[in-house]
Image (spheres, rainbow, N blue to C red):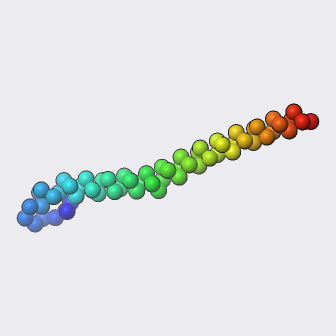
C-alpha cells in the first residue's frame, strides 16, 4: 500500500505509511523498551530487599 503505483494508490499511500510506522514503533517498544524497564525496576526491588535483609542482620548481631 505504501509503495503502490497503480490506480488509486495516492489514496492508500498515507494509510500504508501510517501502518508501517505504527508496526515499527510497537515492535521497538515491545522488544526493547519493555524488557529494559522490567530489568530496571526488578533490579531496584532486589537492591531494596538486600538492604532490608542486611539491616536485620546488623540488628540481630
Residue sitting nearer the eye, 7 or 56: 56
Question: Can you name the residue that lies furthest to the bottom here?
Answer: 6
Question: On the picture, is 35 further left or further right than 48?
Answer: left
Residue at (34%, 57%) from the top-left corner?
23
- Quarter placement of the C terminus: top right
Query: From what the image shows, is residue 50 above or below residue 22?
Result: above
Residue at (66%, 43%) from the top-left corner?
45
Question: On the picture, is 23 further left or further right than 47?
Answer: left
- Quarter placement of the N terminus: bottom left
What is the quadrant of residue 7 in the picture?
Answer: bottom left
Q: How many marks?
A: 0
Residue 60 placement (x, y as % from top left): 90, 36
Residue at (37%, 52%) from the top-left corner?
25
Residue sitting nearer the eye, 4 or 30: 30
Residue 18 placement (x, y as % from top left): 25, 53
Residue 34 placement (x, y as % from top left): 49, 50
Question: On the picture, is 25 further left or further right than 7?
Answer: right
Amino acid at each position: 500500500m505504501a509503495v503502490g503505483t497503480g490506480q488509486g494508490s495516492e489514496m492508500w499511500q498515507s494509510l500504508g505509511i501510517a501502518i508501517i510506522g505504527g508496526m515499527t514503533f510497537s515492535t521497538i517498544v515491545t522488544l526493547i523498551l519493555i524488557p529494559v524497564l522490567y530489568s530496571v525496576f526488578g533490579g531496584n526491588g532486589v537492591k531494596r530487599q538486600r538492604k532490608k535483609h542486611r539491616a536485620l542482620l546488623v540488628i540481630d548481631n
